[in-house]
Amino acid sequence: EAGVAQSPRYKIIEKRQSVAFWCNPISGHATLYWYQQILGQGPKLLIQFQNNGVVDDSQLPKDRFSAERLKGVDSTLKIQPAKLEDSAVYLCASSFRLVGYTFGSGTRLTVV
Amino acid sequence: RKEVEQDPGPFNVPEGATVAFNCTYSNSASQSFFWYRQDCRKEPKLLMSVYSSGNEDGRFTAQLNRASQYISLLIRDSKLSDSATYLCVVKRDYDKVIFGPGTSLSVIP
């Protein structure tokens, strides 16, 4: 079974620039999550999709972050404009009901 | 107060030692509980689920106390390869998953 695919693996941008991350979940996994993990902290949920609908985006900074999952499969997370404090690893995960919650390898973002 | 809290680390233990991690959660509607392991610069990976009756997987034992809203992970006979960050994870309704801040473990030769 293929895992959760994320790209790019690394990204370095200047503050105020825009950046986008892509995630392709495991086939058949209806639930997709984006997490932000700052160094030394646990992952923080940014947004959760069930198919192409948003279940929870209460911790997404909507003034600069956006995410979509138009066809209920792959998803993109965008930051516009980026701030220094957005430097983190952005993890995508998918699950099928209560079984099999799997992470991608993440995108490490550095904002300079 | 954070929804999921863990022992602050780091834990530095010698090989062969037994180490226990504690985790508390604040939402009594939480339904499922897990321990994840995260190696440095890697994504979190499921270590084990935590069941009400307690469960064991080799050197690892997980326990859940719903009344006290408390989860624990015990590692016996620690190996160097056990060095990692251990994340307590709580799942609520609608598959909402909350991670604790993690506890770092270093097993020393």
Image (spheres, rainbow, N blue to C red):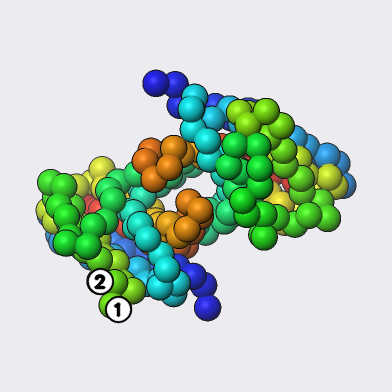
Q: Residues within 10 Å of mark 2 (few under 14, many from 20)?
A: some
> Is residue B85 shown left or right of residue A47?
left
> Is residue A73 shown left or right of residue B42?
right
Res A19 quadrant in image: top right
Residue at the top extreme of this rendering? A1
Is label 2 in contact with label 1 (beta carbons under 8 Å)? yes
Quadrant in the picture for the N terminus of chain A: top left
Cα distance between the residues tagged 2 and 1: 6 Å
Element type at mark 1: loop
Residue at 45%, 60% (x, y): give it. B92
Q: Is residue A2 above or below residue A100?
A: above
Report the number of numbered marks: 2
Q: Is residue B91 visible?
A: yes
Residue at 44%, 21% (x, y): give it. A2
Residue occupied by mark 2: B65
Residue at 57%, 56% (x, y): give it. A44
Q: Chain of mark 1?
A: B
Question: In the rendering, which numbered label is found on residue B68?
Answer: 1
> Is residue A100 shown left or right of residue A86?
left
Q: Are marks 2 and 1 on the same chain?
A: yes
Q: Chain of mark 2?
A: B
Element type at mark 2: strand
| Residue B44 locus on image (x, y percent) | 43, 44
Question: Looking at numbered disc 1 in the image, what kind of residue is underneath it?
Answer: Ser
Q: Residues within 10 Å of mark 1 (few under 14, many from 20)?
A: few
| Residue B65 locus on image (x, y percent) | 25, 71
| Residue B60 locus on image (x, y percent) | 18, 52
Question: Looking at numbered disc 2 in the image, what kind of residue is underneath it?
Answer: Asn
